[in-house]
Image: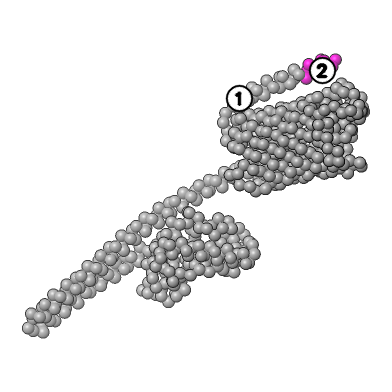
Amino acid sequence: MRRNSEHRLYCTGFRTGCFLLILAGLVYAEFNNPSPTTTLNATRGLTQTASGEAMGAGRLTFSLYGSWYQQKNAITNAPNVDAGIYTGNVSFSFGVNPFIDVFATINGFTSQNYDTPSGNGLGAINCGIQGTLPFPDTIPVRLGLQVAIIGGTSANQINGNNADGYNYFETRNNYDFVGKAVQSLVFGTEGLALKFHFNEGLVASIEKDKGLIMLLAGGIQANFHPVFTMGVEMNSRTYTKHISLLYDPLWVTPSVYLRTPWYFNVLLGGDIALSKQRAAPEAMRALERFRIFGGMVFSFDLLAGKRAQTLEKQKKEEAEKAHLKSRADSLAKKEFLLKASADSLARKAREDSVAAALQNQLQRQRADSLSHVADALTQKSRQDSIALAESKRQVELERSKRSDAEKQLLSTGLLLLDAVYFATGKTGISINSKPYLNIIGRMLAKYPKLMLEVGGHTDNVGGVESNVRLSQLRAESVRTYLLSVAPELSGKLSSIGYGMSQPKADNNSAEGRQINRRVELKVLNKEVLREYNP
C-alpha cells in the first residue's frame, strides 16, 4: 500500500513537471520586467533564504505553497513510521515604499497514516516587516533587517524534539520572535542575473526552557532567462547555548522557478537533509531524508501605470526644454545680428556727421557771405535730424525684439529664473540650466548701469538655518556662473539667501512649495530702469 502511494505521488510529480515544462516553452520569450522570485513568506529571495532587495513600492504578492515528506525513522515526539506529513501556507507581502515591505503567512497541515487525533489543522501564523538600506542601484550590495512574530496557533507541533523537523516553525504552538539580518550581492538585471543571499538570525521563544535559536542561511540564485531561475540554498537551525551545526537541522534546498509575463510564477524544489545522526535514540534524526514542495506566486506592480506616466511626463518636459533652448539660441542670434546692424548704422551716422562737418568747414573757408554759412548749417542740421531719427528707429526696433525675460526685468525690476534646477538638497547647478543662464548672462551684460541681486528662496521643509544656508549656496552658485558668462558684471552682481522667509505661495501644498523653491534676479537701483524704458 505504501509503494502504491509513493508511485501515485511520483506520477503526479512527473505530470506536473511535464506541464510546467510545456508552460515554460509557451512563454519562452523576452519580457522586460519579470516578477521577482520569493520566499515562503512572499518576500524577495529563494524559498527559505531572504534577499536584501526590497519588493518595491506598490508591489503586491500572493503565494500558495505545499510540501510533503514521509516519516521513515521511529523517533520519540515525532510522527509514527510511514506517516505522510503535508504542510501548506498562504502568504502575502506588500511594498509600502521603496525600502519597507510587510508580510504575513498562514500555515496549515494534514497527514496520512498518522496515528494521532490532531493530524490536521491550522498551523502557525507569521507576521513581519523588512527594511532595506537605500543603497544606489550602481553598487551590487543590498542590506536589510527583518523582524517577525510567529503566532503559535497550531494544535500539533508534529516534531517535538529540540528545534527539529522541516516544519518546526510552520506548526508552532508557542509564540516566537524572529530578528534576521539579510544581505545580497546582485550582479545583472532581474531578467538575467547572478545573486548571492546571506541570512543571520536569532529566535526568542516565550516557551519555557527554550533558549535562543540561531538561524543561518545562504543561497546562490541564477536568473538564466526572464522565464527560468534556479537556486541552491543551505539552511541550519541550532541553539546558541549548545551550537551543533552538524547534528541539529542542516539541509540543502535546490529549487526551480518558472516565471511568466502574466504576473504568475511556479516553483518546484526539495529539502535534502545533511544532519548527522545523533547518539540519543529518541532524537537520532533532526530531519527526515528529504521533503518536496511546490507553489504558485501571483505578483502585481500596482504603481506600474503611475511610473509609466511619470516617465512619459519627464520625456515630454525634456523635449519642451530642448525646444525652449533652441528657441532661445535663435533669439540670441537674431539679437546679435540686430545689435550689429544698429552699431553699423550708428557708426555710419557718425561718419556722415564728421564728413558733413568737414564739408561745412571747407565751405565756410571758401564762402564769402553769411548765406553760404547758413545754407551749410541748415544742411548739417537736416542730416543730423535724419541720423537721429534713424538711430531712434533702431532703438525702438531693438526694444521690440527684447526677450520676455528682458522685458520683465526692465519693466518690474524682478526676474524669476524658472529654468534653473538643482538636485534635491544640492547646490550644484544642473547641466540643463546652463544654456538658460548663458542667455541671462549675455542679456545682463547689455545693461551695465544695473546693480543686481541673486536671491535664493526655499519652501518650509527643513530647519530655518539649513534652508537659509541652502538658499545662500544656491544663490552664490548662480552668481558665480553668471560671472563666468559675463565677467563685466563683477561688482554689479551680489547674492543672498532668504530661506523660507519670503514665500510666494502656501507651503501647505506641494504646488505651493514648488513655487516657493526659486532663484530670482532683483534690480537694486530701480531708478536706472527709466533710462532703459524712455
The reply, left or right, for residue 24 in relation to residue 521 is right
Image x and y of residue 511, in percent: 58, 58
Give the residue pinned by disc 2. Answer: 5
Q: In which quarter of the image is the N terminus?
A: top right
| Residue occupying the point 59% across, 27% down | 28
SS category of the residue bearing label 1: helix
Magenta stretch contains residue 4: yes
Rate crowding at label 2 as few (under 14), some (14 to 19) or many (20 or more) other CA atoms within 10 Å.
few
Residue tagged by mark 1?
A: 26
Q: In the rendered image, which quarter is residue 90 located in?
A: top right
Regarding residue 53, the answer to whether it shows in the image is: yes
Q: Quadrant of the C terminus?
A: bottom left
The residue sitting at 64% across, 22% down in the picture is 22
What is the CA distance from the residue labelled 1 to the residue labelled 2? 32 Å
Query: Would residue 375 appear left or right of 17 to someone viewing this image?
Result: left
The secondary structure that dominates the magenta segment is helix
- Percent from the top left, x then y, of residue 404? 42, 62
Q: Which of marks 1 and 2 is nearer the N terminus?
A: 2
* Front-most of residues 221 and 41: 221
In the rendered view, does 489 fall on the left or right side of 259?
left
Which of labels 1 and 2 is toward the front? 2
| Magenta-drawn segment | 1-9
Disc 2 is placed on an element classified as helix
Residue 322 on image: x %, y %? 44, 51
Dot 1 alpha-carbon crowd within 10 angstroms: few under 14, some 14 to 19, many 20 or more: few
**What colouring does the structure picture have?**
one colour
Q: Which amino acid does label 1 sit on?
A: Leu
Q: Residue at x 28, y 68 (%)?
A: 393
Residue under the point 59% across and 66% down: 468
Nearest the eye: 405 or 69: 69
Instruction: Work out whether residue 170 can be spotted.
Output: no
